[in-house]
């Protein structure tokens, strides 16, 4: 037998526990090659120390969570009724003074409240034509932008406090709804102004921002010190299903219009029939309203399932306490049940209503200043609605996230690191799902009630973008685990979308279909503007007679 065909060395031939190595390799067989080693450098020591700290923090986090769960389980109180929890029966009531103090010092962003009256002054100075203050549209935009920051943060704080009174499931729904308050307010104001093209771009932009940039950044920051973070498996699967359903609902009207827009001439010599017409828009309006009702029903059913899932007794408190839920999530749920609120529940409602009124007014001034800036800078309407307005609406949460990251990075520099969180932050994905399955259908029905011709017919470019975002998000969260590399992939896709949106000018047919006037009148106005020498031109797109 050839020496090379001899038996290979076995790992059991080496006794790693004894000081000497006993070899049982037969003579003539290939000896194991000694691995090449190199002198360790300072970088390798730092990397090894970082990995050891990451494993140590992960073990410490799991042991801390397990100990906290044991302690909470020992002190676990029986489930409370909703009214008992809301009225805090048997507990100390929170007074007016304590509530106002907690609201005032809830966040350092509250110091930006001074910009609210300044933004209003800038708007009225610009609207009246008084140039005594010499404030233009750009100054008004910056002031309104700063004024939105504390209001958005108070919505988030109010949602967290309301979750203590309502419980984890209802509290999460309130938090997601209040975090969407800025975007929903902007969308309603655009609908009232009947700027439907900008409204549709903003809807898609908000959803893409919440699907890619926000969770992607959270995955990058949260996974920078741990190999992977966990998501709730059941919640992730449900979110993937209903997100796909909502995105496909956006693709159906676009596919219908694309099929109808194919030129066809039933009689030789007759002009082809175009889908850009009032009859087509009426059909799409009926289709959109039916889809909106179906999406609302689906969203309500999904919330009922999350709040009251069928099955075993351990699910009566919600899916957050299910057996397959992450341990850190269970810890948060039990901690929330024992946490004491800082604000009285009725004062909290008054605060949220006041913030909503201030937010609506400030957003209206913001949109007014944005129109002047858009005209002065020649930025396309698609880019403005798809990128800029959603980023402005997310400014408050983005500012807090940046400060949070800088603070934790400085702690690492000064050797005071905190254990990394094992639970990934995916609330932004739930916010995008709510915007697709609740707020967008709500806007369709509100437009129906107010007589605005808002349909679910979106630009093909927008449909492709949201389909791609949905595909990547579902692929990343398929195993209910995330890491910083997957988060970077989500951020990269958003950067690619920003680049494409800068050069995209929009689909011309949808501009006519998204006017508050009739499609026939919109085509006539377009022809009069582009062909002033012909007077009242009687032909529209593709030579179609208007009369």
Image (tube, grey):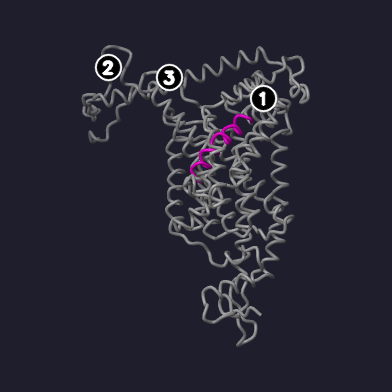
Q: Which residue is mark 3?
A: 56
Please report whichever mark, 3 or 1, sits nearer to the chain's N-terminal start: 3
Q: How far is mark 2 from mark 1, CA to CA?
A: 65 Å
Q: How far is mark 3 from mark 2, CA to CA?
A: 34 Å
Tell whether 97 sits left or right of 59: right
Please report whichever mark, 2 or 1, sits nearer to the chain's N-terminal start: 2
Q: Is residue 208 magenta?
A: no
Mark identifier at residue 22: 2
The residues colored magenta run 141-158
| Residue found at the far bottom of this picture | 269
Q: Which residue is mark 1?
A: 164
Q: Residues within 10 Å of mark 1 (few under 14, many from 20)?
A: many
Please report whichever mark, 3 or 2, sits nearer to the chain's N-terminal start: 2
Residue closest to the eye, 4 or 493? 493
Residue at 66% from the left image edge and 12% from the top image edge: 75
Q: Is residue 157 magenta?
A: yes
Instruction: Provide the secondary structure element on which disc 1 rests.
Output: helix
User: Which percent across, then down, holds residue 393?
Assistant: 54, 43
Locate residue 105: give its quadrant. top right
User: Which percent across, then down, holds residue 490?
Assistant: 46, 43
């Amino acid at each position: 037998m050839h020496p090379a065909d001899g038996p290979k060395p076995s790992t059991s031939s080496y006794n790693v526990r004894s000081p000497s190595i006993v070899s049982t390799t037969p003579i003539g067989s290939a000896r194991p090659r000694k691995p090449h080693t190199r002198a360790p450098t300072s970088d390798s020591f730092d990397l090894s120390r970082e990995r050891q700290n990451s494993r140590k923090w992960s073990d410490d986090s799991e042991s801390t969570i397990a100990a906290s769960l044991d302690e909470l389980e020992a002190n676990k109180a029986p489930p409370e009724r909703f009214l008992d929890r809301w009225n805090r029966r048997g507990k100390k009531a929170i007074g007016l003074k304590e509530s106002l103090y907690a609201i005032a010092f809830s966040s350092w962003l509250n110091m930006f409240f001074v910009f609210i009256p300044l933004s209003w002054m800038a708007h009225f100075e610009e609207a009246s034509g008084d140039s005594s203050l010499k404030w233009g549209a750009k100054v008004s935009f910056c002031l309104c932008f700063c004024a939105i920051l504390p209001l958005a943060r108070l919505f988030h704080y109010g949602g967290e406090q309301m979750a203590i009174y309502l419980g984890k499931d209802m509290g999460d729904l309130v938090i997601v709804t209040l975090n969407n308050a800025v975007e929903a307010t902007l969308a309603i104001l655009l609908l009232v102004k009947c700027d439907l093209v900008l409204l549709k771009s903003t809807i898609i932009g908000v959803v893409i921002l919440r699907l890619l940039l926000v969770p992607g950044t959270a995955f990058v920051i949260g996974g920078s010190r741990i190999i992977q973070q966990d998501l709730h498996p059941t919640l992730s699967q449900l979110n993937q299903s209903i997100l796909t359903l909502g995105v496909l609902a956006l693709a159906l009207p676009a596919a219908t219009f694309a099929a109808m827009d194919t030129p066809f001439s039933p009689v030789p010599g007759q002009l082809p029939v175009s889908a850009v017409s009032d009859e087509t828009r009426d059909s799409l309006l009926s289709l959109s309203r039916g889809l909106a009702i179906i999406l609302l029903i689906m969203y309500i059913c999904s919330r009922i399932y999350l709040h009251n899932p069928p099955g075993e007794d351990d699910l009566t408190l919600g899916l957050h306490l299910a057996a397959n839920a992450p341990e850190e999530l269970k810890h948060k749920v039990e901690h929330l049940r024992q946490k004491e609120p800082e604000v009285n529940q009725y004062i909290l409602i008054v605060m949220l209503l006041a913030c909503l009124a201030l937010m609506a007014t400030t957003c209206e001034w913001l949109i007014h200043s944005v129109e002047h800036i858009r005209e002065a800078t020649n930025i396309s309407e698609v880019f403005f609605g798809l990128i800029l307005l959603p980023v402005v609406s997310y400014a408050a949460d983005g500012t807090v996230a940046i400060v949070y990251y800088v603070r934790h990075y400085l702690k690492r520099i000064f050797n005071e690191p905190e254990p990394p969180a094992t639970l990934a932050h995916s609330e932004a994905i739930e916010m995008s799902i709510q915007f697709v399955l609740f707020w967008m259908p709500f806007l369709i029905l509100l437009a129906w009630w107010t007589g605005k011709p808002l349909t679910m017919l979106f630009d093909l470019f927008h449909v492709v973008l949201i389909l791609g975002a949905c595909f990547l998000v579902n692929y990343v969260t398929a195993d209910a685990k995330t890491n910083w590399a997957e988060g970077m992939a989500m951020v990269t896709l958003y950067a690619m979308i920003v680049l494409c949106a800068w050069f995209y000018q929009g689909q011309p047919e949808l501009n006519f279909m998204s006017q508050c006037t009739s499609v026939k009148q919109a085509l006539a106005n377009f022809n009069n503007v582009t062909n002033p020498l012909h007077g009242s031109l009687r032909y529209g797109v593709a030579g179609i007679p208007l009369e």
